[in-house]
Amino acid sequence: MRTNTDTSRIYDDSASVEFIPWAKPKERALLERLFTAYRAYRGSRRHKVKTIKGDENLVLLFLNHARALPGQLRPEHFERWSNHLYLERGVVASSQRTYQTAVRVFFDYLLREPRFKADIRQTLGVELVQVSTPENSIIHRRERELERNNSRRSFTEAEAATFLERIDLEMALAYQQGSKGVRAHQRNKAMFGSTLEMGLRADEVLGLDTDSFEPNPEQPAMGDFGIVRVFGKGSKWRQVPILKVALSHALAWYMEHVRPNYLAKAAPGEKAMFLSEQGKRLSYSAFHREFRRIIELAGLPIELVPHCLRHTSMSSDDMSGLSLESNRQRHGHAHGSTMQVYIHHPDAYIRGAFNAAIARNLKADGATE
């Protein structure tokens, strides 16, 4: 069993910047200024002194391992440290998440304050960057449990429209501001659009490669993006036909105009469809955080999780007239009975179905004009 070793140092109240003897005096002075401000910030939020000191010491452990200061540190330093915690120190996943969170929160605080970025730039001559990214950090287990909870509901029609409109708004704002972050919003448009229209599980959409797509010979209007080969639950492959030409066009646009912007840091021959800023296959944690960010910005209920997009897809396909068997095969369920927990019909649809049935019966009985 893996254990969390060397925990005595984590809550050692005597730990401070004196524990980085390799730093120059001006570097230790800089770090002391940063930590002094951070302690005051945490204290203003009524965090316990022991908790603040523990988090500070975790940051110091990271700095000592990398032998570098904020501004000099990059994501690769954080990744090597995380690898060291796991392979050499045997830190369990929950503890490693705590270590990573302490570093991420500290860097988030520094990045929010222009004065700290200016201080680092003036003292060290470098620019401060975040080292803990969604791609190189451990997601909380609870988030995965929520994602896999089949009791989740579907989006309403209005909620789905609001969700997609928020992505479009983020794209437009980033484009107007000339932000390079526009490509992340463009990627999200294709990625979450695919998740919603095809009802893919998060792991399935993240596992897509550029060669996962092929034309639908019976529907040439869909172009090169007519059918998707998906590696799904139970290690089984299935073919998922794309039913909306708008998604086919969006994927073609993404492949031609958006994905190439992610390839500068990618390994030669990288095939992953949806990439991170590091040019690697987008991680589950990044997918989840992007979804959560959009939900919050759009003002949608916090109960909505990525798996709700799958519920929405199956419900939409059912209401559009797709047979239960076709719906089952498209979404990769082994049994039709499983579909019952995924398909949700709004009251208006149910009332409409009743009224349509009554109208048909009245017509058959000759009771209508």
Image: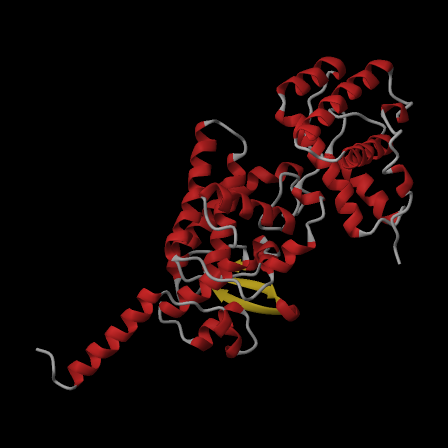
Q: Quadrant of residue 14?
A: top right
- Image coordinates of residue 64 in percent, x first then y, are 86, 31
- Of residue 207 and residue 2, the one placed in the foreground of this image is 2
- The reply to whether residue 359 is in sight is yes
- Image coordinates of residue 318 in percent, x first then y, are 40, 70
Q: Quadrant of residue 172?
A: top left
Residue in view at x 63 percent, y 36 percent? 264
Residue 242, above or below 328 = above
Residue 265, above or below 231 = above
- Image coordinates of residue 298 in percent, x first then y, are 45, 43
Residue 24, above or below 20 = above
Query: In this image, 151 relative to 19: left or right?
Result: left
Rendering colour mode: secondary structure
Query: In this image, 359 relative to 267: left or right?
Result: left
- Of residue 275 and residue 298, the one placed in the foreground of this image is 298
User: Residue extending furthest left?
Assistant: 369
Residue in view at x 78 percent, y 17 percent? 30
User: Residue extending furthest bottom?
Assistant: 365
Q: Quadrant of the N terminus?
A: bottom right
- Image coordinates of residue 63 in percent, x first then y, are 82, 30
Counting the numbered discs, the total is: 0
Query: In this image, 146 relative to 70: left or right?
Result: left
- Of residue 210 and residue 205, the one placed in the foreground of this image is 205
Residue in view at x 64 percent, y 59 percent? 145
- The reply to whether residue 225 is in sight is no
Q: Quadrant of the C terminus?
A: bottom left
